Amino acid sequence: MEQTKRIKISVLTIFPGMFDILKNYGVIKKAIEKELVEIDIFNLRDYTTDKHKITDKPGYGGQNGMVMLAEPFYRFYDEFILSKSHKPYIVLPSPQGKVFNNDLAFELAKKEELVFFCGRYEGIDERVKKIVDKEVSIGDYVLTGGEIPTMVIIETLLRFLPGVIGSKTSVENDSFYNGLLDHSHYTKPQNFRGMKVPEILLSGNHERIETFRKKESLLKTILKRPDLFIKKELSEEEKKVLIVLIQEMFNENSNILKESHDV
Ligand code: 6GU
């Protein structure tokens, strides 16, 4: 039995309804049902102080656009966070944050409790950042709010919780987990519109299949994401697979070697 770890996630947003999409489908819905994760959505408007429940005002300094007020975030912090014995880890999705990747998702998945502050419009009053543990960006482009990035981050980190994805090996084989892209996948039929499944996958020889997949993973990474390959520390086994791959290429195409000698 894999050890069960539970994680509690709270989200503060002016659009609570957006998170129905995250909570009501597929793997995350099942994870909630299995009580591996609790996801609670809080409406930022419930933490405003005026009768119109205003969450933003024009920014100081003559800039265009609205800035989200610090007060509702601090009220949530005082009421919800300070009351706890263990302080949750607060994430602020923002284009100015550390760029999100699998390693950061893995780190976040280790926390017992996470809170996401979703900003909108031009931004959030800078003073909110004082109570934030980490600003996280999902890439070098700008979205109108933190809700979709929050969902991206939650979905990614939940895949690392034991029990959320059916088998541990399918998470470990995923792209990026070991610094390489995933190998290709096929299902029935064996011949689809003239395109055949590689024979080796039908052979039943698990060792050869494993080597074939490692070769594919290495080759795909080199060809499609050389930046990842440069950062990758190769294991002895991976080096052996690469050697065989290169040997095979040169055996079939031995001209390359000859030409380079002829120069
Ligand atoms: Cl986390 N927020 C917003 N608003 N835009 C982004 C982002 C986050 N990451 C990339 N672009």
Image (spheres, rainbow, N blue to C red):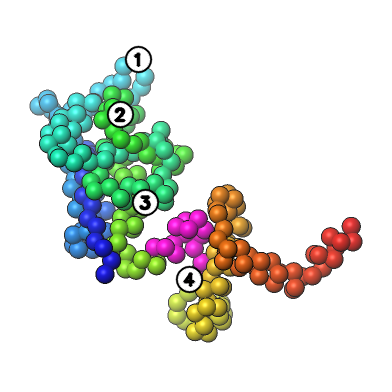
What is the spatial separation of the Cα atoms under label 2 and label 4, in whole angstroms? 43 Å
Callout 1: helix, strand or loop?
loop
Magenta stretch, main secondary structure class? loop
Q: Badge 3: how crowded within 10 Å, few (<14), some, or many (20+)?
A: some
Quarter in which the N terminus is drawn: bottom left
Disc number placed over residue 75 in the picture, else none: none
**Chain part drawn in magenta:** 171-184
Q: Is residue 170 above or below residue 8?
A: below
Callout 4: helix, strand or loop?
loop
209 left or right of 6 in image: right
Q: Are marks 2 and 4 in contact (CB under 8 Å)?
A: no
Q: Name the residue under label 4.
A: 185
- Closer to the chain start, of discs 4 and 3, is 3
Q: Name the residue under label 1.
A: 61
What is the spatial separation of the Cα atoms under label 4 and label 3, in whole angstroms? 25 Å
- Closer to the chain start, of discs 4 and 1, is 1
Give residue 119's position: percent from left, percent from top.
Answer: 29, 34
Disc number placed over residue 129 in the picture, else none: 2
- Closer to the chain start, of discs 3 and 1, is 1
Q: Name the residue under label 3.
A: 106
Q: Is residue 175 magenta?
A: yes
